[in-house]
Amino acid sequence: MGVLKQLAEYLYLRKPDPNRPKSQWIGYMHGINRLSLFLFVIALIIIVVKLIVNH
């Protein structure tokens, strides 16, 4: 699966692939990846806002 397709699934922009294997551990991994991606996007937004406000 492509990286962009996976990111779209993490950001809820695309439905998950129904044919991919189901596993409890893969579900945990995807949950942690989704959380880290959201935190990264929030951190980027905070950095951009601070840069804009200070200038």
Image: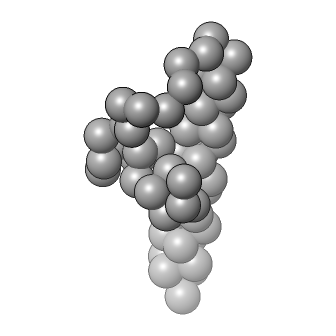
- Residue 41 visible in rendering: no
Viewer-proximal residue, 43 or 24? 24
Image-based side of 8 in relation to 15, left or right: right
Residue 30 sits in which quadrant?
top right
Residue pushed farthest front?
19
In the rendered view, tell whether residue 29 sits above or below residue 52: above
Residue at 57 percent across and 78 percent down: it is: 51
Residue at 30 percent across and 48 percent down: it is: 14
Residue at 39 percent across and 38 percent down: it is: 17
Quarter containing the C terminus:
bottom right
Residue pushed farthest top?
24
In the rendered view, tell whether residue 30 sits above or below residue 36: above
Quarter containing the N terminus:
bottom right
In the rendered view, tell whether residue 54 sits above or below residue 40: below
Residue at 54 percent across and 61 percent down: it is: 2
Where is residue 54 drawn, in percent x and y?
A: 57, 79
Where is residue 19 drawn, in percent x and y?
A: 42, 32
Where is residue 12 drawn, in percent x and y?
A: 34, 42
Viewer-proximal residue, 25 or 48? 25
Q: How is the image coloured?
A: one colour
Image-based side of 55 in relation to 36, left or right: left
